[in-house]
Amino acid sequence: MFLAIDVGNTQTTLGLFDEAGSLVRGWRMSTTATDTSDMLHARLFSFFAKDGLELGCVSEAGVASVVPALERSWRRCLEAHLGHRPLVVRAGESYGMEVAMPNPRQVGADRIANAIAARSTYGAPVIVVDFGTATNIDVVDASGAYRGGAISPGLMLSAGALFSRAAKLASIPIEAPERALGDSTEAALQSGLVIGAAAQAEGLVARIRAELGAPGATVVGTGGLARTVAKATELFDAIDPDLTLRGIREIWLWERAGGRE
């Protein structure tokens, strides 16, 4: 089986795929930059044991990380388990997708994984909105090339900054309210945060579609808060929480088939 690991700044998502490419188990854990390879191996073992699985079923693995220290720790952890080097998705590598940008090396590992999975699943043109620590928008044009996108502070990052700097505002449940016009402090905060995130995505996607000349480009939401934000907008054609994990697996398949020179 193949284990895909997406290491974000706040959370790490793991997915176990069978030989047919179906996701059979998924886990999520906090990202801790000081974790060693031994600590990560212990976490893996506990996840598998909890669900009645043997870690030995994993014969291949791939990691996409935006935290350099953890990229090294995960590589060592997986290399010790597998007996060979795992796939490490590198920022700036195209993996069979043209990157039509002046400096392709600026494209993060998770963003290229999202784009590859979105193109293979939904076709092109396609726009991915990934609601994580940052909200990333990744764009694949009609030719199938990666064109760039947009990056903004994520919903939880914005909420944390607001609650820490505004003394009279308290933390609230991050939920989509029924209306934009909040009639209480809690409703007003939920409107500003969740409906605000939806409105920002709507505005950016509208401009990107216009600049691409692709008004019908498919829009896919992913990331931990995608389902929450989707309740406040009709923007998304699909919500696909496993998109990045599938992209990591697709990159591994591409490399296994001899994609890398």
Image (spheres, rainbow, N blue to C red):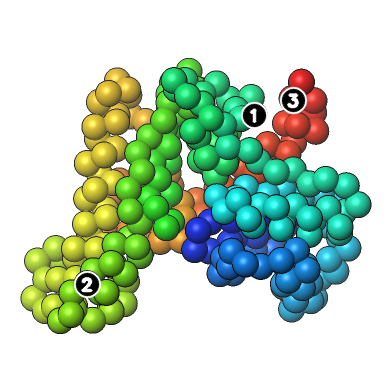
Is 188 situated left or right of 48 in this image? left
**Element on which disc 2 rests:** helix
Q: Position of residue 85 (x, y in %)?
A: 83, 45
Earlier residue among tags 1 and 2: 1
Query: Which residue has dot 2 on it?
Result: 165
Q: Position of residue 159 (x, y in %)?
A: 29, 67
Q: Nearer the viewer, residue 29 or 123?
A: 29
Mark in the foreground, 3 or 2: 2
Residue 118 vertical placement versus 38 (above, below): above
Task: Give the numbered dot on residue 36.
Answer: none
Query: Which residue has dot 1 on it?
Result: 95
Earlier residue among tags 3 and 2: 2
**Element on which disc 3 rests:** loop
Q: Position of residue 253 (x, y in %)?
A: 74, 36
Q: Amino acid at mark 3?
A: Arg
Residue occupying the point 26% across, 39% down: 204
For label 1, count other residues whose C-alpha is less than 10 Å away and answer few (under 14), some (14-19) or many (20+): some
Q: Nearer the viewer, residue 126 or 58?
A: 58
Q: Amino acid at mark 2?
A: Arg
Can residue 17 be seen at all in this image of the molecule?
no
Q: Amino acid at mark 1?
A: Tyr
Q: Position of residue 109 (x, y in %)?
A: 57, 41
Query: Which residue has dot 3 on it?
Result: 260
Q: Nearer the viewer, residue 189 or 228?
A: 189
Residue occupying the point 35% across, 39% down: 150
